Amino acid sequence: MDSGGVLVTRPGKKRARAGSGAPGGTRHEEPGEGGADEAVAFIAEQTGALRKLAERHKLDVLHYLLGMTKLEADEHLRLRTKRKLS
């Protein structure tokens, strides 16, 4: 599907992965394959790094938007943690 020059794809089904064989073995997962909290933490971390890059290159609008994205991700994590403690 083409949306203004941007390729948009449909998400496919994820295949089950084989375990490592060890009880409670570690799984090597791509970012975003865990729960919502893991995804938001990853987004917050990566957004912070991208924001620094935008600032270094004086990309003011991107710096601002990435800052807002990081604030939203941090707030989401804060609220999820607060709910879990209740």
Image (cartoon, rainbow, N blue to C red):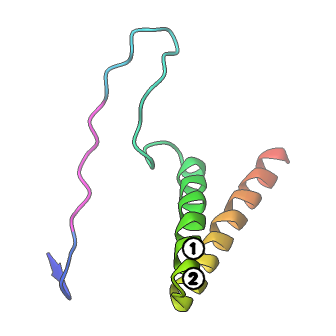
The stretch drawn in magenta includes residue 79: no
Q: Residues within 10 Å of mark 1 (few under 14, many from 20)?
A: many
The quadrant holding residue 28 is: top left
- Amino acid type of the residue tagged 2 in the rendering: His
- Main secondary structure found in the magenta portion: loop
Which residue: 51% across, 82% down? Answer: 57
- The x, y position of residue 13, in whole percent, is 25, 46
Report helix, strand or loop for mark 2. helix
Measure the C-alpha gap from mark 2 to mark 1.
Answer: 5 Å
Determine whether, in the image, residue 28 is placed left or right of residue 67.
Answer: left
- Which residue is at the front of the view, 59 or 43? 59
- Which residue is at the front of the view, 49 or 41? 49
The quadrant holding residue 56 is: bottom right
Q: Is residue 60 above or below residue 77?
A: below
The residue segment tinted magenta is 9-16
Residue tagged 1: 51
- Amino acid type of the residue tagged 1 in the rendering: Arg
